[in-house]
Amino acid sequence: MTPDTSNTTKLGRGPISAEPRINDRIRVSEVRLVGPNGEQVGIVPVQDALRLAQEADLDLVEVAPTARPPVAKLMDYGKYKYESAVKARESRKNQSNTIIKEIKLRPKIDPHDYETKKGHVVRFLKGGDKVKVTIMFRGREQSRPELGRRLLARLAEDVQDLGAVESQPKQDGRNMVMVIGPHKRRSEHKAEARAAAGGGKGRQQAQREQVGQEG
């Protein structure tokens, strides 16, 4: 069983850890027990739950302390903490790989400028980046928010094969903002680009060999 450090103190100043209470630190008379595979055991005295944890060489972890009675689960807490840390690192890694580009439009943009701006959005989405689209209202345009919504809806429809709306249009002062996310992450696009580059080199090598044989 994992040593309990959930209520470690320093200089008598109280808890310094936000970890859940485990094993003997669970100070209630009974818990709603969940088995290691997620099965519902039911409400049992905490001493019985601790005995089951010891017999299975697992930890009793309080996962819902505010429930009545609190919910506790049988698990390998050390393994759980390790897997949680790995998932957190992966999540931070994915967030750092996600870049948000921004495109600014006027509600009465002319067709040529719209196509240019749309081209930028397409390029960003193909590169695996999110795009923040901002409609800038001026003067009396601020009384016509439907112009911005229509323009954003049109843009979202035009690029729907590459991305989807992650944040619906909302008013932000004088602006209206919408976020479109790519269907494929940046890492997937990089992998495809590397594969395409490798395939191109392979074809070039094959062509050179064929030319050499013909010679």
Image (cartoon, grey):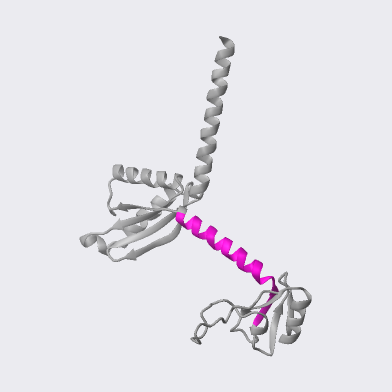
Identity of the residue furthest to the top in this view: 215
The one nearer the camera, 49 or 110, is 49
Identity of the residue furthest to the bottom in this view: 29
Q: Residue at x 57, y 82 (%)?
A: 7
Q: Is residue 76 magenta?
A: yes
- Percent position of residue 211, x then y: 55, 14
- Please identify the dominant SS of the magenta region: helix
Q: Residue at x 30, y 42 (%)?
A: 112
The one nearer the camera, 87 or 24, is 24
Give the magenta part as a residue range. Answer: 71-96
* Quarter of the image with the N terminus in it: bottom right
- Left or right position of 70 against 152: right
Picture quadrant of residue 6: bottom right
- Left or right position of 106 against 71: left
Q: Residue at x 71, y 71 (%)?
A: 38
The one nearer the camera, 52 or 203, is 52
